[in-house]
Amino acid sequence: MIEALKQRVNDDDGLVRRGRYLTTTFLLEVGPTTWLISIFEGQVVSITKGPFVMPSSSFALRASEQEWGKFWSRPAAAWLE
């Protein structure tokens, strides 16, 4: 799923347009697995799977696999509530 993030984001013109002022690198942890995700002007430019010794990132998003599974499975309509 994470590996497909680059294509899914970059293929969404509206999302890239809204993120055009975002340039950052962040750490994403799903249970014990980590990725560094680099974004340049709204487009995902790289996704690198860890492990890392001392990753440099602006922020980190961390949760267990179970919690991420709940987050990713929510229907789109639930975000409007």
Image: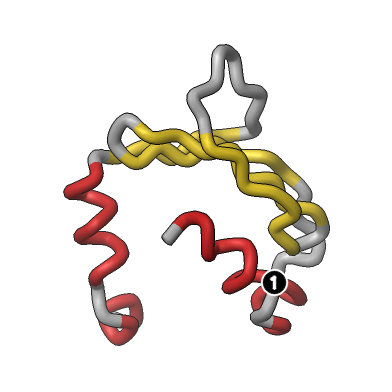
| For residue 39, above or below residue 4 | above
> Considering depth in this image, is 80 or 19 the residue closer to the camera?
19
| For residue 40, above or below residue 37 | below
User: Which residue matches tag 1?
Assistant: 10
Give the quadrant of the C terminus.
Answer: bottom left
Spot occupied by residue 11 in the image (x, y as percentages of width and height): 67, 79
When asked about the image quadrant of residue 78, the answer is: bottom left
| For residue 53, above or below residue 46 | above
Identity of the residue drawn at 82% across and 59% down:
41
User: Which colouring convention does the figure follow?
Assistant: secondary structure
Identity of the residue drawn at 24% across and 40% down:
64
Identity of the residue drawn at 72% across and 66% down:
19
In the rendered structure, the answer to whether residue 11 lies left or right of residue 2 reads right
How many numbered callouts?
A: 1
Give the quadrant of the N terminus.
Answer: bottom left
In the rendered structure, the answer to whether residue 79 lies left or right of residue 36 reads left
Q: Secondary structure at mark 1?
A: helix
Identity of the residue drawn at 64% across and 33% down:
58
Spot occupied by residue 77 in the image (x, y as percentages of width and height): 30, 86
Spot occupied by residue 75 in the image (x, y as percentages of width and height): 26, 80
| For residue 65, above or below residue 29 | below
> Considering depth in this image, is 78 or 10 the residue closer to the camera?
10
When asked about the image quadrant of residue 42, the answer is: bottom right
Spot occupied by residue 7 in the image (x, y as percentages of width and height): 63, 70
* Amino acid, disc 1: Asn
Badge 1: few (under 14), some or many (20 or more) residues near its Cα, within 10 Å?
some
